Amino acid sequence: MTAKQLAACRKRLDTFLTEMLAPLGRKDRQRWGGVYLRGLLLDGERKSVGAMAERLPDGNEQSLQQFVSQSPWEWKPLWQQMAERLECAFPNAVAWIIDDTGFPKKGEHSVGVARQYSGTLGKTANCQIAVSLHRTDARGSSPLGFCLYLPKEWTDDPARCRAAGVPDDTAFQPHWRLALALIDEALGWGLPKPPVVLADSAYGEVTALREELAQRDLAYAVGISKSLAVWPEPPGGAIPAWNGQGRPTQCVRYGDKKPVSVKALALAHGKRFRKVTWREGSKGKLHSRFWAARVQTAHDWNQGQAPGKEVWLLVEWPVGENEPVKYYLCDLPQDLSRQRVVATARGRWRVEQDYQQLKEGTGARPL
């Protein structure tokens, strides 16, 4: 870039930061917030305060450290400001996506660090896990919020939490609860409801999460495991009467029918898988073989639980594979085309781009 182009870019950035950092209040916080963000955007692998202070002409390590770790400012208004700006600049969201990412760590003092499984790392390792919510539209995507996951070994140790600065009233919450809290927070800001919420099987497998999304009138397309049981068609017979003690008078069989695993159902319809192309990738059109059918969930059917809402079961079985590789439950309209169902369920790919850009471009990580 030429000197003139750099000056114009700096001017646009300053205008942007003046708007985005207004919730910080005091001028000195806004100033050092802007310096810190410019440090993250500059070239250089190390994004520590000391390294950035050396690269910045107006950098000061002590002032930056004060801003990051000691200055009392609310971070939630910044997220809301960003979310509202995104909605204004890029209306018509395509989906909200929930996911999580891992940050490898060597020590044991960083908040939430533990030996735990990370999909990002592909193994169990010493790391921190952050649950995130992303907004995606036709032009791109951006995070709407992050929440650090605290394993039980942290929340069961108040002294350890207190030493790391974790608020005393912080209780254990599983990943899906943190994701739901991020969704509720974004809705509380007044953002329009997304057309659909997407998630992988680590979240989609949780019946309670799907039920909570349905209660909020949020459509979903989520991954599930091959063992999840469903009713392949509305079961016949009435729901058994209850004996007044919270138990059914007989096991729910609905005549001679039982729910079946989604894998068994997919294998039984192996000849019905058809090639579907869902989008243009960097190396050409993306396609695979899919089969879809309307089913009802069968959570706790042997405890007398009535069949769940009718949804799409979508299964992917690529050519050359011995069995299906991916399964989805999609709470989407019955008249939606198979191509649209596939394109929706496979819409999580932008999240990986978000993580890559945040980690490689700005060195984003928990403190």
Image (cartoon, rainbow, N blue to C red):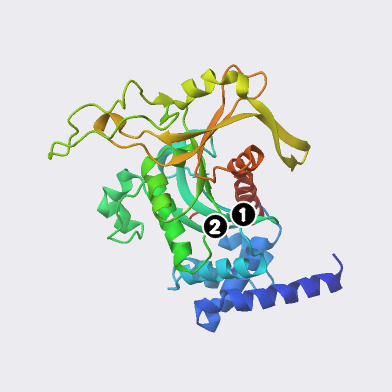
Alpha-carbon neighbours of circle 1 within 10 Å: few (<14), some, or many (≥20)? Answer: some
Where residue 208 sits, quadrant-wise, is top left
Q: Residue 344: x percent and y percent?
A: 61, 44
Q: N-terminal of the two: label 1 or label 2?
A: 1
Q: Kindly state the secondary structure of the residue where label 2 is placed.
A: loop
Q: Which mark is residue 270?
A: none
Instruction: Looking at the picture, tell me which residue is in the foreground, 143 or 212.
Output: 212
Residue beneath label 2, please?
Answer: 194
Q: Which residue appears farthest toward the top when viewing the image?
A: 322
Asked if labels 2 and 1 touch by Cβ distance under 8 angstroms, the answer is yes
Q: Relative to residue 15, is residue 192 drawn left or right?
A: left
Q: Residue 124: x percent and y percent?
A: 46, 33
Q: Kindly state the secondary structure of the residue where label 1 is placed.
A: loop
Q: Residue at x 57, y 75 (%)?
A: 21
Q: Amino acid at mark 2?
A: Pro
Decide: is 214 above or below 225: below
Alpha-carbon neighbours of circle 2 within 10 Å: few (<14), some, or many (≥20)? Answer: some
Residue beneath label 1, please?
Answer: 94
Q: Amino acid at mark 1?
A: Val
Decide: is 302 above or below 161: above
